[in-house]
Structures are given as C-alpha cells and as structure tokens.
C-alpha cells in the first residue's frame, strides 16, 4: 500500500513537471514571438492596419501605365518623324536626280514661237499680212567682232530648235574695239561675212533677223552717218527679197544726243532703205540710251515721208529701271506709239549686283500685258552678268542647263512650258512664257 506521504510527493512531482513543461513551452513561444499579451493587442492591430495601407498602390500602377502610354506615343511620333524624314530625303534625292539630268542634258523648250512671214506696223502694233497680231521674242548677240561664233549657223539653228525663239539680233558695234567703222576694210569684209551667214541661217530656220547698227561709245549716230548710209544701202540691196530682215539704224543714242539729232540722222538713212524696200520694218533708237519715248511720242517721224513700218526702240535693265520707267513705257504704248524692246537685261545697267528676280517678273508681266516684241542681251560667255552663257563654258551651241548663267536660266525658264514658277517671287509670276529680249 502506498502511504499518504508517497501520494502527496507524487502529486507534487506531477505539478512541478507540469509547471516545468508549460513554462518551457511558454518560454519558447515567447522567444519566437508567438505570444501576444493583452496590452499588445491594440499595437498589433495598429501595425496590421499600417501594413495593410501600403496595399493602396493603385496610383503607382496608374503612373506606370501613364509612362508606358507616353513611351508608346513617343515611339509612334519618332516613327512618324522618321518616315517623314525618309520621304523628304527621297523627294530631295529625286529632285536632285532630275536637276542633275537637266543639268547634264541639252536644253530643250516645249514651245516653238511662230514665224509670220511679212510683218507690218498698224495702230502701234505688229501684224502679219492677214492682220493677226504678232510678237517676236529672241536674243541679241554681243559684239560680232568679239563673239562671232555665237552668230554661226549652228548656233542660230540651236537657238531656234532648242529655245524656240523667232528672232536673232546681230549687234554690229560701230566704234568700240574692232568696231565696223574703225577696224578697217578687211575687218568690215569679215564682219559682213558673219552677217551673211547669220541671215542665211535665220532664213533657213524661219526666224527674223535684226541688223543692229550698234552705236554706243559714239553716242551720236551722226558721227558715222556716211558709214551707216553705205552699210544699210549695201545690206538692203543684198536682202531685198528677205521679208525676215529688220533694220535697226541706231542702237543707243546717249550723252547729250537729242531727238532732233536722231531725226536728222534718220531722215538721211531711212530713205536709203526705202528706195530699195518700201515695206521693211525699221527700228529707230531714242535718246538717253533708248529710254526717252516722250520725245518720239511728241514728234514722231513722218509716216508719209518714211513709211508706216517704223517702230521706236526702248531698252531697260530690270535692276536699274523700275516702276517709273514701266509707267513711261506704258503711257507711250497707251498713246499708240509703236515700241520694240530691242535690248534688255534683268541686271543693272553696269552689270553690278545680282539678277533682280522681283523686278524681272514685273517687267516680264508688262511685256506680256502689251504683247511686246523683244530681244534679251546678250548671247555670249563674257564675264558680264547679262551674258546668257557661263564664262566657263566654251561652247557656242548644244548648251545644257548648267552652261547657262543666272540670266540665261531665267530666260530659258520663261520660254519653257515647264519653267520653274516657284523661283519667281510673290505674285509677280510670268504669264504664258512666250517672249523676251534685249540688246
């Protein structure tokens, strides 16, 4: 039998073991943080709430999505910009290729100006035999003594075939170096041979040809009046049957030469032509380098004495002569004065400065408006700004686009149906490119 004492000790031992076991478990849980005391409940809940709050990450997601949208948009914009840049580069390359092709090929207009047969002056304008109004547009050579090759048969044929012009002006300088009146008999014969070849070439190619007695440094045409009488007498007899030959009896009377001086000269020279050819077109220069039309308007040559086929010449340089000069010309035309623009350029009178596109367009418009016949100055490769051919070009025909000077390109573009209208400023665009000329 177990004594009461032994039972008591056994109970005590069990209680102690239970306390030890429970205390051990509690201690381990406490160390591992698995026990929460009542006073810790509020703090734990607060921490739980604090932990839960960061779950509101939606704004961050929206920002991220927004950045992704912006990135995609930027990529699209960059892609579009690249496509546009590539397209522009392709267009530029095609444009350069076309320009290169044009530059390397012989120039060719799409239009041939008409040949009208015999022409006459009526009511201040030029008409053909059945009274259709006509217009001559072409080019003036430079001094035949200096640039004879540009008046060759090949050159004239090229001008007709490839530029389509219908008149060539042969500038026979009278007194400048190697001029007709100062170079001697041998030079005169040489120059007359050049003229003869050019007249024949113009005739063969159905063009008009102007024989220009090119007074310049000999300001007053009366200085070489006897030589002029002899020259025109010989020329009109040689070309009596040529309905395409036009006689310009003095180029640019200047300095103090008056209209009375010019009339006195004309009264002796014109009859020499009229005795042989009563209907040939005759051009008469006006004072101040062919800019004073008022004098001729106030006191024109007597048509009963000299015939009706007479026109008065006007010259302009677009960078020098502007609105006031255009008004002078317009007024004379409105008054019925027959005017032929036998010489002009788009530069200044002294060739200083650049081609004036703005004024050039205004002059072109005026020529078109009044259907004026004209010749542009000058067919040569001289170092003048007004030369139509580049100084570096050694050809006198078969020109390509890059062989032309700036003035030559402007003139060619005007003649061509495919002229570059974009290069002409503002609204001063050329009308139907049909004509121009000068000197």
Image: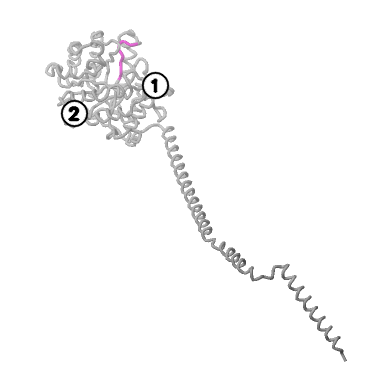
Q: Depth check: 168 or 329 in front?
A: 329
Residue 177 placement, left or right of 85:
left
Q: CA distance from mark 2 to mark 1?
A: 34 Å
Q: Depth check: 260 or 275 in front?
A: 260
Quarter-wise, where is residue 57 in the image?
bottom right
Q: Position of residue 14 (x, y in %)?
A: 80, 81
The N terminus is located in which quarter?
Answer: bottom right
Helix, strand or loop at mark 2: strand
Is any part of residue 199 visible from this angle? Answer: no
Q: Is residue 172 located in the magenta-colored stretch of the structure?
A: yes
Looking at this view, name the residue that lies furthest to the front: 5
Q: Position of residue 204 (x, y in %)?
A: 30, 26
Looking at this view, name the residue that lies furthest to the left: 304
Looking at this view, name the residue that lies furthest to the bottom: 1
Q: Which mark is residue 381?
A: 1
| Front position among marks 2 and 1 | 1
Question: Is 99 above or below relative to 28?
Answer: above
Badge 2 or badge 1: first in the primary sequence: 2
The C terminus is located in which quarter?
Answer: top left
Q: Which mark is residue 127?
A: 2
Quarter-wise, where is residue 156 in the image?
top left
Q: Position of residue 174 (x, y in %)?
A: 30, 12
Q: Position of residue 26 (x, y in %)?
A: 73, 72
Looking at this view, name the residue that lies furthest to the right: 1
Numbered range of the magenta stretch: 170-176
């Amino acid at each position: 039998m177990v004594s009461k004492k032994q039972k008591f000790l056994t109970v005590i031992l069990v209680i102690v073991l239970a306390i030890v076991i429970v205390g051990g478990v509690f201690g381990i849980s406490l160390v591992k943080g698995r026990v929460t005391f009542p006073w810790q409940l509020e703090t734990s809940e607060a921490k739980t709430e604090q932990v839960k709050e960061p779950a509101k990450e939606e704004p961050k997601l929206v920002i991220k999505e927004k950045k992704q949208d912006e990135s995609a948009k930027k990529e699209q914009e960059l892609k579009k910009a690249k496509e546009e840049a590539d397209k522009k580069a392709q267009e530029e390359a095609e444009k350069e290729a076309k320009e290169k092709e044009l530059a390397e090929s012989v120039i060719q207009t799409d239009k041939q100006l008409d040949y009208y047969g015999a022409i006459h002056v009526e009511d201040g304008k030029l008409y053909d035999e059945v009274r259709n109004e006509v217009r001559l547009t072409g080019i003036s050579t430079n001094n035949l003594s200096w640039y004879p090759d540009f008046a060759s048969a090949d050159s004239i044929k090229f001008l007709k075939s490839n530029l389509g012009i219908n008149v060539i002006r042969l500038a026979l300088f009278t007194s400048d170096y190697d001029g007709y009146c100062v170079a001697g008999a041998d030079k005169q014969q040489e120059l007359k041979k050049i003229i003869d070849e050019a007249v024949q070439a113009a005739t063969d190619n159905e063009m008009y040809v102007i024989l220009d007695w090119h007074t310049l440094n000999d300001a007053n045409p009366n200085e070489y009046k006897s030589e002029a009488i002899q020259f025109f007498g010989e020329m009109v007899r040689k070309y009596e049957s040529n309905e395409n030959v036009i006689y310009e009896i003095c180029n640019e009377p200047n300095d103090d030469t008056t209209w009375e001086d010019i009339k006195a000269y004309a009264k002796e020279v014109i009859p020499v032509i009229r005795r042989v050819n009563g209907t040939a077109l005759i051009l008469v220069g006006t004072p101040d380098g062919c800019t004073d039309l008022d004098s001729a308007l106030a006191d024109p040559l007597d048509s009963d004495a000299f015939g009706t086929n007479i026109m008065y010449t006007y010259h302009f340089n677009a960078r020098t002569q502007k609105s006031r000069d255009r008004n002078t010309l317009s007024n004379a035309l409105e008054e019925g004065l027959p005017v032929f623009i036998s010489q002009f350029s788009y530069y200044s009178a002294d060739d200083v400065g650049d081609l004036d596109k703005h004024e050039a367009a205004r002059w072109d418009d005026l020529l078109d408006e009044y259907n004026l016949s004209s010749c542009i100055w000058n067919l040569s490769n001289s170092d003048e700004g007004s030369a139509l051919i580049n100084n570096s070009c050694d050809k006198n025909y078969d020109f390509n686009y890059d062989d032309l000077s700036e003035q030559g390109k402007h003139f060619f573009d005007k003649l061509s149906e495919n002229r570059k209208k974009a290069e002409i400023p503002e609204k001063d665009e050329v009308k139907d490119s049909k004509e121009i000329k000068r000197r």
